[in-house]
Image (cartoon, coloured by chain):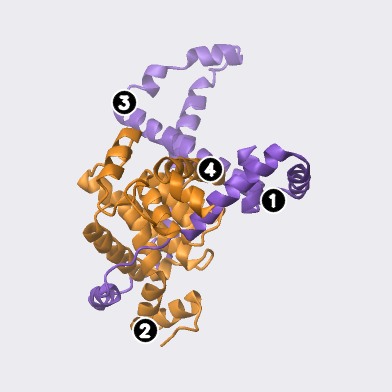
Chain colours: A purple, B orange
Amino acid sequence: MEQRLWDYIDGLSQTDEKELIGKLLKEDMAWKSKYEELIKVQDWLQQADTEQPSLRFTKNVMEEIARSQINPAAHHYINNRIIWGIGFFFIAMMVGILIYGFGQMISSPGEASTVSKSIGKLDFSKFFNNNLVNALMMINVVIGLFLLDNYLTNKRKQFRKEA
Amino acid sequence: MMTGYTDNEIISFVLNGNQGAYAQLVDRYQNYVFTLVLRLVKSREDAEELAQDAFVKAFKYLKDFRGDSKFSTWLYTIVNNTCITFLRKKRLEVQSLDNEQVFSRADNLDSGMRSDAVEHKSKQAMVNEAIKMLNPDDAMVITLFYKAEQSLEETAAVLGIEINAAKVRLHRARARLKEKMISFYPEEIKELN
């Protein structure tokens, strides 16, 4: 009840919810008394005052600023081509590993080329016998998860905005 | 004087070389920024220094302000990050007071804010004291929402949390504030109501 009333007071309720709560406030004493209690809290909160820094505050800031310069905007010194280049490097590495793996699956002439047999022919020791390769693969996995998380977060935000 | 200008207009003056115009923004937001910092850092000296740092940082990175949010929201995000970095660096114990501490603190308040010690205190002073007794997260969310004129979405952006999380935090903070007010100032509240 309290959460719904706070949403109503803060103006966050949807139209139908607003109407419903408006009706409840007229008809239900429990809702009405709770509402009045929360309005008092709201009133207290609006009474709170801000603190004041020393009188020299603005002067101090301006003196500090006089010694510094405005930095160039981040998008001016972050070169997108470098970021894309790094991305391309990792994607190329993943594609390279896949091509190498599938290359091993190609059977010799005259041999039955079923996938199961081919997979059996894979020499994983050749694949994962190098710490560097393992480390790079791990980095790729982490980057992949990070990008997926970013993508899903953006999607969710977009969905919320649309809703 | 540049009192009639909007934040964005003042920012464009600053970016066009009128550095002095920034003083107007500092004047406009210093109380809010200082209050927010005081919610996280209890010492006034530290708070003043951090508030200044936040304004200087905002000035240095002014070109990164794209104007897709309010300047105040962007500034409070810098304030919040500056305070968090400071607290991490200094490893200060964030004053997250449990009930027992709150009572002992209230007993020791020189200002005599306890109900049995005061005659009549203004409602404003009582609310300020009660907010100070809250933990920094609660105090911050209340200050942002009620004093710093930030919407729930903007409050969430400043704190770097989801809107729903901000809503829950605000709800809890108000409930805790109510408890504090009832515990410490029962008589005054009755009188005021």
Q: Can residue B94 be seen in this view?
A: no
| Residue marked by disc 2 | B17
Rendered view: B149 above or below B161? below
Looking at the rendered structure, which numbered label has been put on residue B171? 4
| Residue marked by disc 3 | A130
For the residues marked 3 and 2, what is the alpha-carbon distance in whole angstroms?
56 Å
For the residues marked 1 and 4, what is the alpha-carbon distance in whole angstroms?
25 Å
Residue at the image point whose x is 23% and y is 44% from the top = B92
Residue nearest the observer in this picture, B87 or B171? B171
Residue at mark 2 shares a chain with residue at mark 1: no
Residue type, mark 4 in image: His
Local SS, label 4: helix
For the residues marked 4 and 3, what is the alpha-carbon distance in whole angstroms?
54 Å
Instruction: Locate residue B149, reporting x and y percent.
Output: 51, 62
Instruction: Locate residue A27, reporting x and y percent.
Output: 78, 41
Q: Which of marks 4 and 3 is in front?
A: 4
Local SS, label 2: loop
Q: Could you classify mark 2 by the number of other residues whose Cα lies within 10 Å: few (under 14), some (14-19), or many (20 or more)?
A: few
Residue at the image point whose x is 46% and y is 51% from the top = B142
| Residue marked by disc 1 | A162
Proximity of marks 2 and 4: CB atoms separated by less than 8 Å: no
Q: Which of marks 3 and 2 is in front?
A: 2
Residue at mark 1 shares a chain with residue at mark 3: yes
Residue type, mark 3 in image: Asn
Residue nearest the observer in this picture, B36 or A116? B36
Residue at the image point whose x is 53% and y is 15% from the top = A119
Q: Which of marks 1 and 3 is in front?
A: 1
For the residues marked 2 and 1, what is the alpha-carbon distance in whole angstroms?
40 Å
Looking at the rendered structure, which numbered label has been put on residue A113? none
